[in-house]
Image: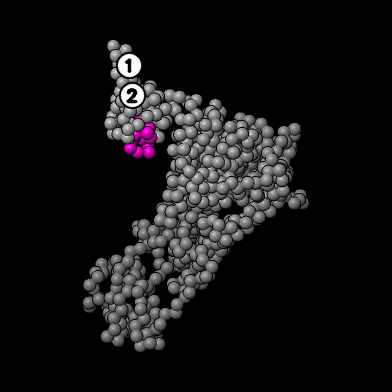
Amino acid sequence: MGEKKSLNAQQLLQQGIAMARAGHKEQARQALMQVIRMDPQSLVAWLWLADVVESKKQRRDCLERAVHLAPHNQAIRQALLQLQSPAPTSVSRGGYFLGYQSSSQYADSIERIATQQGYHPLWVNRDDPDNLLLRLCQAIFCANLTMFDLSEHEPNTYIELGIALAFNRPILILSRADVILPLVLRAHTVVRYYTLSDLETHLTHHLVDLINIREQASSPDSLMTDYCYVCRQICPAIAAPPDENAYLILNESRLLWRGLTQVLAPHLAGYHLYPVYLSDQIGSNILCDTRQKVLASQFALGHLGHLSNEHSFLALGIAIGSQIPWILLAQAGETAVPTDLLGFPYLEYTQPNDLLEPLTLVLSDFLGRVSVTMPLRDTTSFLTLSFWAQLRDWIAHTRKSGKETKVESAEQFQLLQYEGERRVARHSITGKGLVVGRSHDCDVVVEHPSVSSYHFRVMPVRALQTRSRCHVEDLGSKNGTFLNGVRLTPHERVGLRPRDTIRIPGARFLVWAEEQLPTDQPRPTYKDTGLLPPILRIELPDVPPPTYMSNWEHPTVLTVVLPDGINRAMFEVQSYYPVGRILAQLQELLDLPPGRYRFQLRDTLLDDDETPLSINLKREDVLVMVTAS
């Protein structure tokens, strides 16, 4: 029976091949598919079927099956590779950056595949140590594609991968199939390979997918402005406000760092600084969580030698790219520095107690709240301030020249302060942010009895590639902070965009990111023109909504007969505004003669503390503005 089945399959195979050669694809396809149903291991049937199927996807499926049956057949692999990448494209997709490789065995193949897809290499001369880290950051920032082969467990490669994560560049991670990657990368898509043929096939496939994702994310009509190339979605971990009291320990494990933390943690706690450990997992996507931990920290504390691992160097790279201060420690005898960091100092010690004085000195310039009695030495090199200044200046120049999509920085944001319709001040948002409140030690003081001592604050967001550059946070105020009319939940941080409006009693703030300030248009008055000015809305920013209202916006339209008994005004107010305050504002806008005015509804005079809400004012009601006797 087996011989008959084999004979029938062989006859059908010959018929299918004959039909294919004669150009009868439909009949050939039916015969070959019947052969495969009878004998799924028939390599010849899969190859001939690949020539007569209807779609490119079906052809690729057939060739992939053939590669599975004959993994060492280079001709089949080459056919599959050509199908995935048929010819060099004429479209220029920008530059690609290839991370550090101790061996350049496959660099030529990677360059060829990237070139076929329209990329050109961004080379960095690693033999020249001068400004090497700055030049690496520049190349990674400009790259539209970054690739990192992690087969060698090389610290430099992980540092550069971290920088790419900080810049949120498109990333492809490569590795030999027999290499065990650190836990932080196991949920990430990795191009695995055994041989050069594997690398070419899989890299081409992943590269095409990444191109499609990038084109979708960078489309002008795309909503994917904060798209994360790590988790392949809109990711809240792409930016994080700083925690004023947290520093990050780039540890492999708490146990190995126990001797250091027992000395350093109590000392730094005296300055209200508390450790967050890199090894503590906070979510399922460890890579995104690592970036969020770094961005939220005041500084990162790393270590050379056996107290660090690949995860530590990756987080250090994120700190470098995100301009988070980093300090490296080194035990005497373990001072091997990755080549990317040559020229940057580190704190060497024999016993953990040796670190207390130099670490305090290093942090004193940065934090400003660490006071020491000893004279301060120059410690700016530890915090790489000159490196950051160079990097920021270069990024700003690159964006202005149009080489990179413009993303507003926190330094460009301002808060324009208004009282009514009049702008009274403007405040630049610095690196430490702005605190607004009634207390005189606030950055912006608002003298109003309904404003809390510390009402709200605006803080810069630590991320270079996200549209939201600042957060606003209500500091538990009694009368609330309102963003675009919506009351903020106390202590919840919300992203700000240009032209957002923040309201508190007594003041209104406009978030502004343009060089030219908005112009103040003077209102025409009734006295000057003999005509009613175009009053569309009366604003009383110092009148907050009642506590039972979660939203600032509760508008109602008033129709008012003016004192001359002829003219009428129709405008919008908030339903919780006292009518006495509405009258005073109306008197000022119309430049009416001095005197006391009241509203009359039908035959009833309204008290000044009543509101449209309390009197249940309806849209068809008409208020008459009369002179009080």
- What is the span of residues highlighted in magenta in the rendered image? 49-59
Which numbered disc covers residue 171? Answer: none
| Mark 2, residue position | 14
Q: Nearer the viewer, residue 517 or 504?
A: 517
| Amino acid residing under circle 1 | Ser
> Relative to 436, is 424 above or below?
below
Q: How is the image coloured?
A: one colour
Q: Secondary structure at mark 2?
A: helix
Is residue 336 rendered to the left or right of residue 511? right
In the current view of this chain or complex, which residue is farthest to the front?
A: 22
Rounded to the nearest angstrom, the CA distance separating label 2 from label 1 is: 12 Å
Which numbered disc covers residue 6? Answer: 1
Residue plotted at (65% across, 55% down): 389
Residue plotted at (30% across, 34% down): 24
Residue 546: x %, y % from top left: 36, 61
Residue plotted at (47% across, 40% down): 85
Q: Nearer the viewer, residue 427 or 601?
A: 427
> Relative to 73, is 461 above or below?
below
**Image quadrant where one finds the N terminus:** top left
Kindly tell me whether residue 188 is visible in this rendering: no
Q: Secondary structure at mark 1?
A: helix
Q: Nearer the viewer, residue 173 or 91?
A: 91
Q: Which secondary structure type mostly characterizes the magenta part of the structure?
A: helix
Residue 112: x %, y % from top left: 55, 41
Badge 2 crowding class, 10 Å Cα cut-off, few under 14, some 14 to 19, many 20 or more, is some
